[in-house]
Image (tube, rainbow, N blue to C red):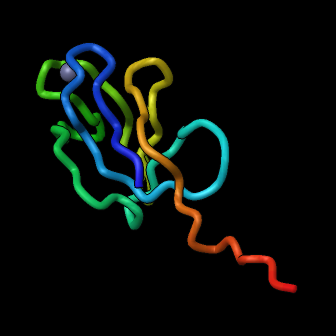
Amino acid sequence: MVTIKCSVCRRKLFRYHKVGKGKILRLYKERIEADYSIHRGNEILCPCGNIVGIDVGPWIKMKGGHFTVSGARERGFKEKKRR
Ligand SMILES: [Zn+2]
C-alpha cells in the first residue's frame, strides 16, 4: 500500500494498492483504498487547487511532478523459495 500526497501542500490524497515496479502513471480505481481528493468534472484536485490527475474512466491519469508517493508496493504474489 502506498500513500499519494500533493507535491505542493503535502496533503494526503490517496491510499493505493500499488503492484509492480516503476512510477505511478495511472491509478486504477479498483485499487484505490481511500480517496481524499476533490473531483471536479474529470479533474482530480488537491483541496489546495493542485491538479494531480485526470479521470479517464477506469483509471486516473496522473500528472507527473504534481504528487509524491511513499510506502511500499504489494508483495503478495511473490512466492517463497523452498528447498
Ligand atoms: Zn495540495
Q: Quadrant of the N terminus?
A: bottom left
Tell me residue 7's x, y (percent).
33, 18
Residue 62, picture quadrant: top left
Residue 66 placement, left or right of 14? right
Residue 65 placement, left or right of 13? right
How many marks on residues?
0
- Judged from this view, the residue extending furthest toward the front is 83
Residue 33, picture quadrant: bottom left
Residue 47, picture quadrant: top left
- Judged from this view, the residue extending furthest toward the bottom is 83
- Judged from this view, the residue extending furthest toward the top is 8
Residue 65 placement, left or right of 55? right
Instruction: Say above or below: 20 vs 66.
Output: below
Q: Residue at x 39, y 67 (%)?
A: 30
Instruction: Say above or below: 7 vs 70.
Output: above
Q: Residue at x 45, y 26 (%)?
A: 63
Ligand 1 picture quarter: top left
Q: Residue at x 41, y 45 (%)?
A: 60
